[in-house]
Image: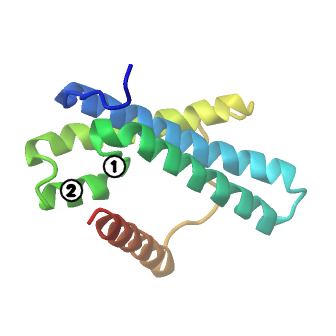
Amino acid sequence: MSGDAVVAPASPGRRVAAEAVGSALLAATVVGSGIMGERLAGGNAAIALLANALATGAGLVALILAFGPISGAHFNPVVTCNAALRGGVRWRRVPGVVVAQVAGALAGAVVAHGMFGEPLITFSTHVRSGFGQCLGEFVATFGLIVVIDGCSR
C-alpha cells in the first residue's frame, strides 16, 4: 500500500472512541511513569519527576501523532472547547467528546494502578487546594492552549 493513500474522514463515533482510547493511554502513561519513576528513583524526587516528565512528553507526542488524524488528539476538555470556539469541532459534539475524555482518563489511571499492583482506586493523601493550586492549573492550561494554537498555524 502506498503512503499516499487517501483516508476518509473519521465518523463521529470513531472520533469519540479515539478520544476515549487516547485519553486512557495518556493517563496510563502519566500515572504509570509516575509510579515507575518513584520506584526506580530511590527516594530522589527530582529524578522521579524528570522520568515522569520525559515519559509523559514522549507518550504525548506519540499519541498526538497516532490519534491526531482521527480525532484531533485533544485528550483534554479545555482543548476540545478551544477547538469548538475556533470552529474545528461542532459544539453539539463537545459533550460526548468530553465524557469520552474523562471516562478514558479514569480508565487509564485504573489500568496503570493495576499494572503496578496498586489498589485500582485510591484517594490522594496530598492536599491539592488553594489559590496556588488554582493559579498553577490556570497557567498550565493557558500555556497548553497557547502552544497548541501557536503550533497549529
Determine whether label 2 and label 1 are within 8 Å by CB: yes
- In the rendered image, the quadrant that contains the C terminus is bottom left
Label 2 sits on what residue type? Ala
Q: Nearer the viewer, residue 66 or 107?
A: 66
SS assignment at label 1: loop
On the question of residue 108 being in view, the answer is: yes
> Which quarter of the picture shows residue 128?
bottom right
Inter-mark Cα distance, 2 to 1 = 9 Å
Residue highlighted by disc 1: 74
Residue at 25 percent of width and 40 percent of height = 97
Label 1 sits on what residue type? His
Residue highlighted by disc 2: 83
Q: Does 28 sit above or below residue 125?
A: above
Residue at 33 percent of width and 67 percent of height = 145
> Which quarter of the picture shows residue 36?
top right
Q: Does 152 sit above or below residue 140?
A: above
Mark toward the start of the polypeptide (2 vs 1): 1
Residue at 71 percent of width and 63 percent of height = 49
Q: Nearer the viewer, residue 42 or 4?
A: 4
Residue at 28 percent of width and 39 percent of height = 71
